[in-house]
Structures are given as C-alpha cells and as structure tokens.
Amino acid sequence: MATNEVTLSTYKFYMNGEWKESQSGQTIDIMSPYLYETIGKVQAITKEEVDDAIWSAHDAQKEWAKTSLQQRASYLNKWADELVSRQEEIADTIMREVGKSYKDANNEVLRTADFIRYTIEEALHMHGESMRGDSFPGGSKSKVAIVERIPIGVVLAISPFNYPVNLAAAKIAPALMAGNAVIFKPATQGAISGTKMIEALDEAGLPKGLVALVTGKGSVIGDYLVEHKGMNMISFTGGTNTGVQLAKKATMIPLVLELGGKDPGIVCEDADLKEAAKQIVSGAFSYSGQRCTAIKRVLVHEKVADELVGLVKEEVEKLTVGSPEEGSMIVPLIDNRSADFIQILIADALGKGAEVVIGNKREHNLIYPTLLDHVTEDMRVAWEEPFGPVLPIIRVSSEDEAVQIANASEYGLQASIFTKDVNRAFRISGKLEVGSVQINGRTERGPDHFPFIGIKGSGMGVQGIRKSIESMTREKVTVLNLAE
Ligand code: G3H
C-alpha cells in the first residue's frame, strides 16, 4: 500500500499508471457509516486532471486494442488473483467504508474475482459472424459480410456505494476485455474500496493510462466527465434521478444505466407461504435493503395475508441488528439523510392508516427492520424506493390487482412471484413490466452471467457478463466482394 498512501489514510488518484495528489490541494473526507469517524481522505481532482486522464486513456487504448485476447486475459487473471490475495484487506475496507457486514464484504471480493474470470472466458469465446449476400432476394453469392465486434474507445464507469468493488469491476473487466480504456469514477462513499481494487489492477501490471481512477466533488467533475467529448460510452449504476440527469447530458454515446427499483414480491393464495416469507425477508432486508434489487413491497392475496404477515414477522425477528463487524444483517445506513428519508416514508404511511407489525425504531442512522401492514396506494411507501429496511405489505383481492399495482410503478427492475402453479406463474410473469421475473425466489442480480435488465425508471441497456461485453463494443461489417 506504500505506493498509494500520502499519510496513513489519504489516498491518491490514479492516472497514466501513477498515483498522484491533486493539484487542487483538496481532499474529501470519507466517514464510516458506523464508526462515525473519518477513515480516510480521497483526492478532489480538477477538470484539467480529468482531461489528462481521458486523453492518456485514449492513447493507451489505441495500443491496447492491438493486443490479443490472450494478452488481455493474462492481465485480468492477475488482477483476479491479486484481489483474492488481498481479500481480507479489501473486505475490511468495504466493511468500514460502506458498513457492509464483513461476511458480505468478503463475498463481494470473491464474487468480483469470479466475475473477472468469467468475463475473461466469455470474451475468449465470443465470435463474430459471417453472412451470405444471396440470402436476400436478388443478393449475390459473391458478397460475404464479416461482422465483428470492435472496441468502443474510452468507457466511463461510474459505480455506486453499495457494491464499491463488485459493481465497479463489473464495468471495468468487460470494458478491458473488449479492448477499451476506462475512466473509473467511484461513488465518493466507496472510493477507498475502489482505490484498493485499482491498486490490485496496478499490481497486475496493466499498461499505463488504460485505467484511471478519478475521485472528486460531483459539483466539479460530475457533469464534466459525463459531457466530456473524449468519452465514448457510459456505464452507470446509481439512483434514478442521477441516471436521468446523466442521460440528458450525455449526447450521442451509448449508455447503460442500472438505476433504482421498487421490486414487488407477489404472493398468490396457493404459495408456499413459509418459503415465500423466507425469500421475502432475505430479499428485502439483506444489507439493510440497500440493494437496487431488494424486494421493496409485498403484494399478497388477502386470503393468505394474515398468515403471510405472521410468517414474515417471525423471519424479521430472527434478523441480527447492529454493527457490520458483528456480522449483522441490519446495519446503520450509509448516512443520516437516508435514515431521515425512511422515517418520512414511515410517518406518511402511519398517518394514512398503515400499521407497524414490527420495527419503526431508530438509533442515529440505524433503522430497525420495519414491516408495515395495510399499506394502501395513497401512501408514499407504496411507490417510493426507501433503500433501507422498511417493507410495505399491500393486500390485494386478485391476481389482476397485483399486476396492476406492480405495473403502476415508475420502476421496472425485477419482480418475484410466489405460487405453486407454474401456469399462473407464467401468466403473471407475462404481464409484468420488469426486466426479470423470479419465480419462487427473491429478486437479485446474480448469477452474474444472467442478463440484468432494468426498464422504465430502472434503467436502460442490459448487463450480465456477455451483455456487458456487447454493450462495450460496436459491430463493424467488412464486406468481401468476391470475383464470380
Ligand atoms: O444494487 C444493485 C445491485 O445490482 C444488486 O445486486 O442483487 O446482487 O444484490 P444484488
């Protein structure tokens, strides 16, 4: 770590293969969400430094695009190995920086190494296609099209706080295997974890300039990065509001956006309620609900609602609450503002007649897991994304009503359907306006090679390893005109 520490806990940014202090002379304090102290500082870089990073990336990309897939694979394999060898240190950083339990943080590091390795394999096995001219009416056999995927250039990868390593590597690895350079802008809360991940990449000997780590104030470099003429593609994971603003500012370049969600868990009257309750609680409350894919509302048939609520309550009672260092599932939220917002949603619901089944207790930014029953459509919590441990139960009288409420959301990430009837599951699934439907399981992104899709306010484009590689390449056609 000696390469990157100015003092005990001030981290440099990374460009052109060097760790640097910003000319701005300014840093940003990173406060731990549960230790309530500054655990490090990151550089607040300038626009000029952003320019340098981007143009160095362009130079490096030109050379990188000439390398063979096997050469790229060898760097990325070293990166994955390096992450695993630093697993404890990185997991500890994730835990302290974003308050994720050590076990989950550790899993995040391992999941990332697996992600990188699968990305390598996938890229090695992706091939273009050739097309015959004579398959089109009047076309000639002498024309043959060779369709290849070529790099897109410089990719801007913007990652969120909740998976500061995994969701960053999920952009960087496909971009690099596809022959691109990357400008990586981590969420400020998560930037130290992102830095550790880039240290591992640096250690793998990646050519200079190919990846830059830029940290700084959104007000100074946020829009500047997004609007920069040197950017050829943006892959962003974060809040819907930010994603929408980004899409307005980034013109004429491909975008992949993974945004918020309000994933429903639809529980039919014939569901295995015990299993549904387990899946719902794990889906809703893991990492205190700070996942875009968390189950964020339950739409349950009124005939089984009382029983389901009882079973969900039993599961919630088993959740551990406290410090991530003790392995708690319910941990302090990323900041006080998030906890304030959740309290507003709870208060609004209670004011309109919802009932607290369990929870509604707060200590600083720690919100105890909260189950709200008899939530109705006039309540904000029926529609807004809390990104925290509060789960509304909405009772419905029919399958159609469940579908109607599910689809009335501004979001369209995932949905779960709990039923023993496969025909019913497919019938409901066919009507849901979401990217993915989980039948008898919780909503979640993984396994990471599955396509991951958000529609409506939940995003645009497709991720999942193969799809991410595709999104970071463009097709190019070379037509052979053979002599007859
Ligand atoms: O927060 C957004 C992530 O993509 C969710 O990933 O379903 O693996 O927790 P996950």
Image: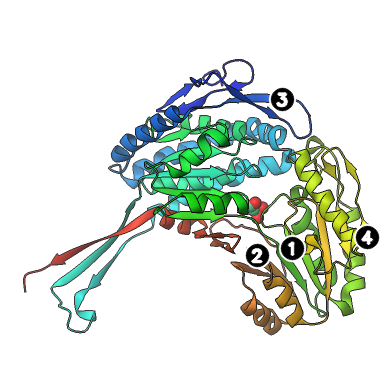
Q: Amino acid at mark 3?
A: Thr
Callout 1: helix, strand or loop?
loop
Provide the residue designation for mark 4: 357
Q: Which mark is residue 336?
A: none
Q: Which mark is residue 383?
A: 1
| Vertical relation: 343 (above or below) 82 | below
Callout 4: helix, strand or loop?
strand
For marks 4 and 2, give the CA distance: 27 Å
| Vertical relation: 479 (above or below) 229 | below
Q: Amino acid at mark 4?
A: Val
Callout 3: helix, strand or loop?
strand
Residue sitting at x 58%, y 44%: 166
Residue sitting at x 88%, y 73%: 305
What is the count of numbered marks?
Answer: 4
Which of labels 1 and 4 is toward the front?
Answer: 1
For marks 2 and 3, give the CA distance: 37 Å
Q: Earlier in the sequence, mark 2 or mark 3?
A: 3
Crowd tier of the residue under label 1, counting other residues whose Cα lies within 10 Å: few below 14, some 14–19, many 20 or above: many
**Residue 329 seen in the figure:** no
Residue at mark 4: C-beta within 8 A of ligand 1: no
For marks 3 and 1, give the CA distance: 35 Å
On the image, the x and y values in percent for residue 271 come to 80, 76
Provide the residue designation for mark 3: 38
Which of labels 4 and 2 is toward the front?
Answer: 2
| Vertical relation: 27 (above or below) 446 | above
Q: Amino acid at mark 1?
A: Trp
Q: Closest to the observer: 314 or 78?
A: 314
For marks 1 and 4, give the CA distance: 19 Å
Provide the residue designation for mark 2: 410
